[in-house]
Amino acid sequence: MDVKRILLQNKLLVFLFIFSTAFFLYQHSTGLSWDFSAYSLNARYMLGEGFYFEWYRAPLVPFLIAGFSPFGVLIAEYIFIVFVSSLFFYSCIRLSKTLEIDPRLFYALLLNPFLLINGLSVGTELLSISMLQLLIYYVLTKRGFGAGIGAGLQSLARYTNLIYLPLVLFTKNIRKILLALLAVALLFTPWLLYNMLATGSPLTSIANSYALNVLYRGYMVMPFNILDILVATNYLFPLFIAGLWLRRRRFELKDWIMLSIFILALVSYSTVPVKEPRYAFSMILPCAYFAVFALKTVWSKHISTINLSAVLILVLVSLSFSIPIATLQDRSRYEIEPDDCMLASNAWVFLNYMGYPSEPAPRQWEVEEKIEEGYRLIFYKDISEPDYVQNTTFIHRFPVIEENNEYILLGDKEKCMPRHIVNRTYIQRLNESTYTKYNYSIETDSCRVLFHGFC
């Protein structure tokens, strides 16, 4: 397929790409995003320039940001955004031609308000769906190793994307399936080796991600909420239902693959304790695919004429919904003037990103100990966690250095904990906190955290 020829013949595609990329860049310039900031911090740490690292983060996003950093990590963030938007654009064109659907309509449907707002604000969503599109493309073109590369990179962007690995079975060829699994193994090997060398276990990152998001989140189990699905897919959902119904008697391999993605995304969303709309992000892809058939049926013979108008309308609708709510956290809120002592905060990622070394907020029974050790505890009042921050009686039991409408800063001015690197794992911190409170230890072996008695 000649991508250049397609672009020259479809200037609307180029317009949509420029529009969406400009939107992503604008959004990033409006402030800070928690997860994106954490990935950028991990990139700085990988480059040997950082003082904060989160082991439970998958490595692909920080690796890419680090790779784009000859001119500095901040500029690299914008290069990363352009790169991912370009990859998404490229994968859409590749996949749409393989699916034999109009790339203009498919790309425009994918650029719905939810994708625009959440695709790059967090850092992994648009990259994940781009890799998922390449995975499907390689499965449909019967290239097992390529399918494995798509599945592997997608999983290195977010570990939960491993749920889409079974899609390689649609190649229907044992040799190609084994090649796909080999590609995934080869992609994961460098990261597992890094984990092994740095922590003594190749599974440290994956185990900490599982512990944080699943194993120790039982106290926050949320029920299935259909509104999350509807928010993620918005106007695509009724078109998805209509397109699915219209295709029911002509189902081909590509239809089964898309339906499987929707089901796997639904399973993934249903099984995580904490639920929010962006965990249903991958559903946008199959919804957009089946929506194309719904619209083609409605427009019938005039599809080529009406497509142009419809795409422009979709873009304007998406833009009107997205821009007013696209802004991120105001970075000026985290421009503080602390002394040279170590911080602990409920906004620790933002503070680290702004250059103030900070540990996560201590648990309630650790607050007094942290102050005694010389930490400065800064709690932002509009952040609901930890719960005790809203308990003014408890908070004001401790010495207050500063308080305003934004935050309260606690600490003993006579004591000062020197600033230091924060790179302990989530499991290590949780174990220390649990032992202090209850005098017993939790499981810290990564293999046993993941596989329990099978290690």
Image (spheres, rainbow, N blue to C red):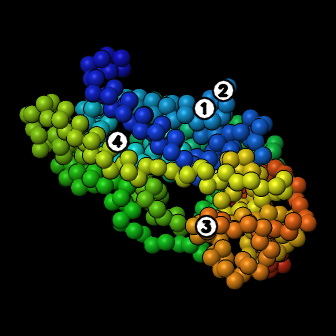
Query: How far is the residue under mark 4 from the one under mark 2?
Result: 30 Å
Instruction: Tell me the residue that label 2 is attached to.
Output: 71
Percent of width and height locating residue 389:
66, 73
Percent of width and height locating residue 66:
66, 33
Disc 2 residue type? Answer: Phe
Instruction: Tell me the residue that label 4 is attached to.
Output: 111
Disc 1 residue type? Answer: Ile
Instruction: Tell me the residue that label 1 is attached to.
Output: 75
Disc 4 residue type? Answer: Leu
Earlier-in-chain disc, 4 versus 2: 2
Query: How far is the residue under mark 4 from the one under mark 3?
Result: 38 Å
Tell me the residue at 32%/44% (across/down).
Answer: 319
Instruction: Tell me the residue that label 3 is attached to.
Output: 405
CB-based contact (under 8 Å), mark 1 and mark 2: yes
Of the 4 image quadrants, the one containing the C terminus is bottom right
Earlier-in-chain disc, 3 versus 1: 1
Q: Quadrant of residue 336?
A: bottom right
Disc 3 versus disc 1: nearer the observer: 3
Query: How far is the residue under mark 1 from the one under mark 2?
Result: 6 Å
